[in-house]
Image: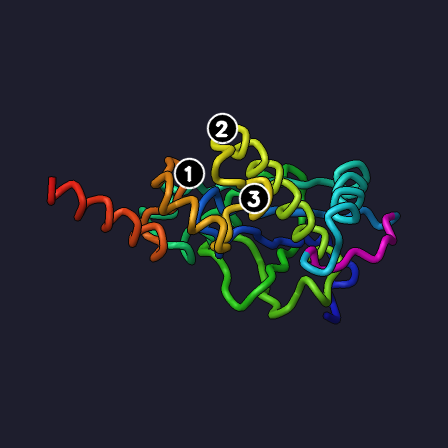
Amino acid sequence: MGGFMDKIIVGVDEAGRGPLAGPVVAAAVILSVKDDIPYMDSKKCSETDRRWMAANIIKHSVCWSIGIVTPTEIDQVNILQATMMAMHRAVDGIKVPFDWVLVDGNRLPDWPYSAKSEVKGDQRFRCIAAASIIAKVFRDQIMVAIDEKYPQYAFAGHKGYPTVKHVQALESYGVTEEHRLTFKPVAKVLKKITFQLDLE
């Protein structure tokens, strides 16, 4: 990374591109130079470890921010653009000066910041790994709250991902306001419901 070593870097990552329900959430994090914990890709951590690391990041980071894009917004634009929107909102929420943004993946939002995308960045850069942890933990908390509203869908368990149990719940109970209507399994259920209504 060369000249990045003496720069103030914002790490950015997202959680929730693949689920059929719930928001996509991005996090932006500036780690403290005094924080030397070896953060890792959130997908490689246990839930307990993620929560512990998220609490530590929130307590000790220079600044952190969350960007959320709702299911309705996802349907309006598509999941790729929704992910870019979430990242943009997260970085916009960083209220201290910074030099560069490092984003996990191979695409960058259309924004005014000096930035670089890094494939598998959450495995190579602590600031991106920290962002992945914050995004995942924050989104999981949202899905647990949604589970309380719609317990029959078991959102607290699968977090909105297309598990067999989730798809079965969709077919049994229909679509909620938390579902992404343009995603194929959800659209299929909607089409089936519409067809049945047309027959009545």
Magenta range is: 35-42
Q: Earlier in the sequence, mark 1 or mark 3?
A: 3
Q: Are marks 1 and 2 in contact (CB under 8 Å)?
A: yes
Cβ atoms under marks 3 and 2 closer than 8 Å: no
Scheme by which the image is coloured:
rainbow
* Label located before the other in sequence (1 or 2): 2
Disc 3 is placed on an element classified as: helix
The residue that disc 2 covers is 149
Residue 12 location (% of width, % of height)? 62, 53
Residue 22 in the image, given as x and y percentages of width and height: 47, 42
Q: Circle 1 sits on which residue?
A: 178
Q: Residue type at mark 2?
A: Lys
Pointer 3: what residue? 90
Q: Give the secondary structure at mark 1.
A: loop
The residue under label 1 is which amino acid type? Glu
State the residue at coordinates (51%, 52%): 161
